Amino acid sequence: MSGEKGLLVSKIRDGTVIDHISAGKALKVLRILGITGSEGFRVAIVMNADSRKLGRKDIIKLENKYLSKKEVDLIALVAPTATINIIRDYDVVEKYNVSLPEEITGLIKCPNPNCITRKPREVALSRFRLLRKDPVVLECCYCGARVLGEDVEKYLEA
Ligand code: CTP
Ligand code: ZN
């Protein structure tokens, strides 16, 4: 954040800060991570913070919570500019950009209603291959149906 003057939420001692989320996407990031607030760890969400790089950005702070790299990379589906900061004893000990995994399993519903992964009695988890990163193009491994760009949000599993 640009200086500590405009700090709305205090620094955390340990945990994860998801920074540089495009403004308006914070809740979608939480959704993709499956974080509801009932897990017990403290969550801070700042929306529309000032950012030199993005103009406006959202920030999420997860206290005493660490995510796997794979989990975190799914954030790229809705917030490709996000950066992940790992905090230990108030210091940023690791920082990296999110990047989409080549395969995404069990997170996005196939848009094809006849796909085997949509049949209530089948146990097949949805599985998509990443065809293109920006804008995102995903292809169902079972039926070949594609999910494009912003539509990803529409097809997120509940
Ligand atoms: N942060 C935090 N608690 C800490 C340390 C950092 O909440 N103990 C937050 C900062 O407020 C910031 C993010 O983690 O939102 C990254 O921190 P830092 O790398 O210090 O900030 P910048 O240098 O501005 O990061 P960048 O270069 O990625 O913009
Ligand atoms: Zn399909």
Image: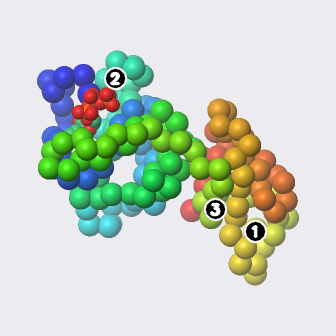
Quadrant where the image shows the N terminus: top left
Residue 40 or residue 19, whichever sits in front: 19
Q: Which residue is painted at 29% across and 59% down in the image?
A: 65
Q: Is mark 2 within 8 Å of ligand 1?
A: yes
Mark 1 residue CB less than 8 A from any atom of ligand 2: yes
Residue 66 x %, y %: 33, 57
Q: Within 10 Å of the Cα at label 3, are there few (<14), some (14-19), or many (20+) other Cα atoms?
A: few
Q: Along the horizontal axis of the image, is 158 left or right of 90?
A: right
Q: Which residue is label 3 attached to?
A: 105
Q: Give amino acid for label 1.
A: Thr
Q: Which residue corresponds to the image point at 74% horizontal and 43% vertical from the top-left?
A: 131
Q: Height in image: 9 above or below 35?
A: above
Between marks 1 and 2, how big is the CA–CA gap? 41 Å
- Residue under the image location 77 percent in, 56 percent down: 140
Tell me the mark number nearer the camera, choosing from 3 and 1: 3
- Give the Cα distance between marks 3 and 2: 33 Å
Report helix, strand or loop for mark 3.
strand
Whether residue 115 sits left or right of residue 101 in the image: it is right
Q: Is residue 31 visible?
A: no
On the image, the x and y values in percent for residue 110 come to 74, 58
Looking at marks 3 and 2 on the same chain, the residue that comes earlier in the sequence is marked by 2
Look at the image and tell me in which quarter the C terminus lies. bottom right
**Residue 51: x and y, percent?**
34, 23
Q: Secondary structure at mark 1?
A: helix
Relative vertical location of residue 47 with respect to residue 145 in this rendering, above or below: above
Quarter assignment of residue 91? top left
Which amino acid does the dot numbered 3 rest on? Thr
Give the residue type at disc 2: Ser
First reached walking from the N terminus: tag 1 or tag 2: 2
Badge number at residue 117: 1
In the picture, residue 67 is in which quadrant?
Answer: bottom left
- Say which residue label 2 marks: 51
